[in-house]
Image (cartoon, helix red, strand yellow):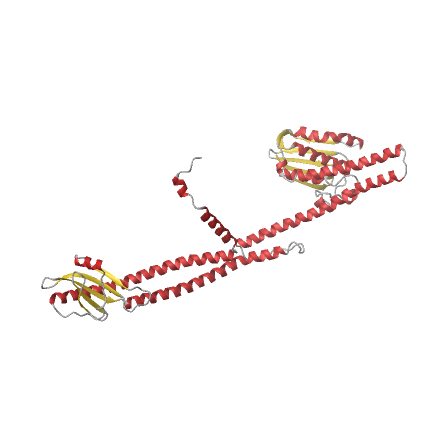
Amino acid sequence: MTPPPAGDAAETPPSGATGNGRRGLRRWGRLPIVARLVTAVALTMAVVLGGAAALVYERVQHALDQQLDAELATYYHQLQADLRAGRKLGGPDGSAYQILDTHGQVIQASALVRPEQLLTPGQVTSAADGATVHRDIGGLLPLNPHTLRIKAQRVQLPDHRNVIAVAALRRGHRDEALRELLAQLALAGGLTLIAASYVGYRTARAALDPVERYRRRAATLAGGPSGTRLPVPDDRDDELTRLGHTLNQMLERLESAAERERRFLADASHELRTPLSLLRAELDVALHRPRTTTELTETLRSVDSEVQRLIDLTNALLDLEQLGGTHHLTRARVDLPELIDSAVNPHHRAAERDQRTITVDAAPGTIDVDAGWIRPAIGNLVDNALRHGHGDIRITATTDGTTLHLTVADQGPGFPPDFLPQAFERFARAEASRTSSGSGLGLAFVSAVAASHGGTAHAENTDHGTVVTLEIPC
């Protein structure tokens, strides 16, 4: 195997460092939101306060240094003049001097610095060569009363000898001012950081308290009474309030869905119990005593009828579940009159037996629908009219280019008024038809087909009978 180029290997970060960084991010992500917000505010404020303090300190230090350098330059000028004139050397309070030969030996010095060597050998050499040497002795911390600022330069005496004149001033006032400034900045920065962190904490808590109230209330919803909602204020319109309204709307939909599911299970269990009970009764009667061939045949036919009823009910339920999403549709252009005729033709014989007629009035043209679902939906409407209606049945189908309008009308007594709002629900049957054949899923199937196509289905009673209307985008 060819080893990777040296450059690539050098650019690859150590796996240990990468792992530690990822673990750090995971630990950070596990912290509570309030803790993360307060930490972020505190770190940001610390950086801002640190930058501001550094700027203030640098400007004050620069001003104090300028003042001290100006005083030192004045003192050095006076010291140099006194040397050249042969006068007695001196200076203001807090000043000191040393006079060195070009080899660094002290020739003359003030009492304050007589025992000290103010210049290093290298600085002595630089000054002897004509350079101006600046030096600070002692630091800002720890406290030191003998901190000095030094200026040294070569001076030619009247006897033509060269000496090095070293002038020094105490930095005590300057250092004390800077130490006091640091203390004040640290105190002000610390108090500001604490205040900012507290304000950040209170702000974060105020922003997240509604979320916590939502969480506590949501925790009680599972075992609580129906109709429970999140406590959302009505006098606000912020992001959390809108979230609360959205969650309440979701709860309403979930509660409605759960209620429909409970009704569905209750109705389904009732509808399945009847044919199963009849099957059990037929078999018990058949097994109670020996039966003739004719009696057994009749029993088997009855059992077959109930089994077929169970199969029809199961298929209807499966069809309704399959229609729960539009991804089951396969739209295609179909001829409207042919679609209506193919759906109605199987029912002409049943209509003739009841001495009734089925009239179709379908406008010419094509529509874009899933014929595999539309055809049985129309058939269910016709079958429903044959079972529960009276008189002739009239089917009208028109299209305006975008929507199919289909109506099935009969001349029967119509639906009971209180039944109309629930006519298209699963297992919904008018009380008068409870004992008649049918599962109560026909109109529910029709409504599901219309909804899967993006359309609607509704029923109404007229002076001449019942009218069921489908409106389907095509």
User: From the viewer's perspective, is residue 289 above or below residue 194?
Assistant: above
Q: Position of residue 455 (x, y in %)?
A: 63, 39
The residue at the far left in this view is: 159
Q: Is residue 411 visible?
A: no
Measuring 14% from the left and 67% from the top, which residue is drawn there? Answer: 82
Measuring 81% from the left and 42% from the top, which residue is drawn there? Answer: 277
Q: Position of residue 21 (x, y in %)?
A: 46, 50
Of the pair 136 and 384, the residue shown nearer to us: 136
Measuring 39% from the left and 66% from the top, which residue is drawn there? Answer: 187
Which quarter of the figure has residue 189?
Answer: bottom left
- Name the side, left or right, on which 8 lies relative to 265: left
Measuring 49% from the left and 59% from the top, which residue is drawn there? Answer: 203
- Name the side, left or right, on which 285 lies relative to 376: right
**Location of the C terminus (image quadrant):** top right
Q: Position of residue 223 (x, y in %)?
A: 67, 55
User: From the viewer's perspective, is residue 401 above or below residue 71?
Assistant: above
Q: Position of residue 56 (x, y in %)?
A: 33, 61
Task: Tell me how many marks there are.
Answer: 0
Of the pair 7 and 348, the residue shown nearer to us: 7
